[in-house]
Amino acid sequence: MAGEQLSVRVDSWIWSVRLTKTRSIASDACRGGHVRVNGVRVKPAHAVRVGDEIRLRHEGRERIVVVSRAITKRVGAAVAADCYVDKSPPPPPREETVTVAVRARGAGRPTKRERRSIDKLLARPTVEGQRGSRARPE
């Protein structure tokens, strides 16, 4: 295949197999110490060969891949997946976010009745002693 060699720069290979979006992001990751080849931190120009293990910390996740083909040209996702063996742990499960009720723009503040139904829905405790009487400072 065109663009295939015995050894290639690590930043170029990481970009070619689509582990990062741009080559400059791959270079920055190498300079920042986020890339290890066979357990050793490397600079962007470090040569990688078939069989090398690459560990990349990117976007809050560690990717562990073994090089199965050294390429320099960026290829499609299907071909890129054939260029390495992914040994990464599965990503952690996403935390579910609580959706917040959104009022229509211009609807103003909720009425007393709407507020009570919202409190009931959100299981907020109600204030018992103040119902029907005004609270006075003592």
Image (tube, rainbow, N blue to C red):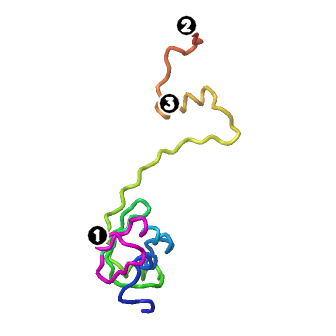
- Circle 3 residue: 120
The mark found on residue 138 in the picture is 2
| Image depth: mark 3 or mark 2 in front | 2
User: What amino acid type is highlighted by mark number 1?
Assistant: Gly
Seen in the picture, residue 129 relative to 2 is either above or below; the reply is above
Residue 39 part of the magenta segment: yes
**Tag 1 or tag 3, which sits nearer the N-term?**
1
Residue 78 part of the magenta segment: no
Q: Is residue 7 left or right of residue 24?
A: left
Q: Secondary structure at mark 3?
A: helix
Q: Quadrant of residue 136?
A: top right
Seen in the picture, residue 106 relative to 64 is either above or below; the reply is above
Identified at 35% across, 89% down, the residue is: 6
C-alpha gap between disc 3 and disc 1: 55 Å
User: What amino acid type is highlighted by mark number 2?
Assistant: Glu
Q: Quadrant of residue 65?
A: bottom left
Q: Is residue 19 left or right of residue 119?
A: left
